Image: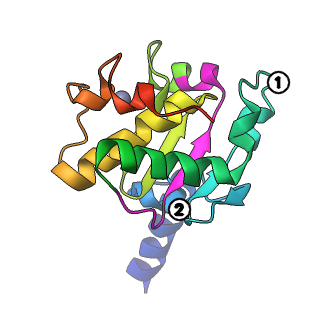
Amino acid sequence: MLSKILGFALLMLCALASCGVSPEWDNHGYGWEHDAVSSNGIKVSWSRAAQSGNWADELLMHPEFYERTWQRMKDCTGMDGPTDGMYIVLMPADYIKRRYGPNIGGKYYSDPPLIVAGETAFLVRHEIGHHFLLHTTGDSDHNHVTAMFQTPNGCTFTVPWN
Ligand SMILES: [Zn+2]
């Protein structure tokens, strides 16, 4: 009986301290709330970026933008990736720099799939590129050696902004 109580106490402590929690528990720390779902099933959250008062591109507050960009990246790269369970969370650029590093504008997580990006269309395309690469070649190309990341001819630069 005592060991049961101790076990329960440990479990409660773990729950409070989040020990041993896997990344899918809270969507890599970004949670599951979203502002819209695009017609191809991507859950999109822009309100945290919009609340920063530093909003760069109004276009990003329309769910159609994400479906259109996804399709254009498919057409341009000849690659694809599942939209199943995909979240795109826009965050203030300052937050992303603080969390990931001074030269970082976005972040791609594969499992569960999550794109975190600053408030520009370019960054959204860039992270979609990492997702497509992972699901097409098996390597998300963290070091950006693939053609799509190379300026001026790569798809992340040439796919239209709007
Ligand atoms: Zn990248």
- Asked if residue 55 lies left or right of residue 87, the reply is right
Q: Is residue 8 magenta?
A: no
What label sits on residue 53 in the rendered view?
1
Report if residue 86 is visible in the image.
Answer: yes
Q: Residues within 10 Å of mark 2 (few under 14, many from 20)?
A: few
Residue 42: x percent and y percent? 56, 60
Q: Which element is circle 1 on? A: loop
Give the vertical position of 116 relative to 156 (above or below): below
Which amino acid does the dot numbered 1 rest on? Gly
On the image, the x and y values in percent for residue 40 come to 55, 65
- The magenta segment is 81-96
Sequence order check, earlier mark of 2 and 1: 2
The one nearer the camera, 113 or 56, is 56
The CA span between labels 2 and 1 is 35 Å
Instruction: Tell me what residue is drawn at x 48 percent, y 78 percent.
Output: 5
Residue beneath label 2, please? 15
Q: How many numbered marks does the figure carry?
A: 2
Quadrant location of ligand 1? top left
The crowding category of the residue bearing disc 1, from other C-alpha atoms within 10 Å (few below 14, some 14 to 19, many at least 20), is few
Residue sitting farthest toward the top: 102
Residue 113 to residue 162: above or below: below
Query: Which of the 4 image quarters holds residue 60?
Result: top right
Quadrant in which the N terminus is drawn = bottom left
Instruction: Estimate the x, y position of residue 39 in percent, counting from the top left.
Output: 62, 65
Eye-nearest disc, 2 or 1: 1
Is the CB of the residue bearing disc 2 within 8 angstroms of ligand 1?
no
- Position of 43 compared to 112: left or right? right
Q: Amino acid at mark 2?
A: Ala
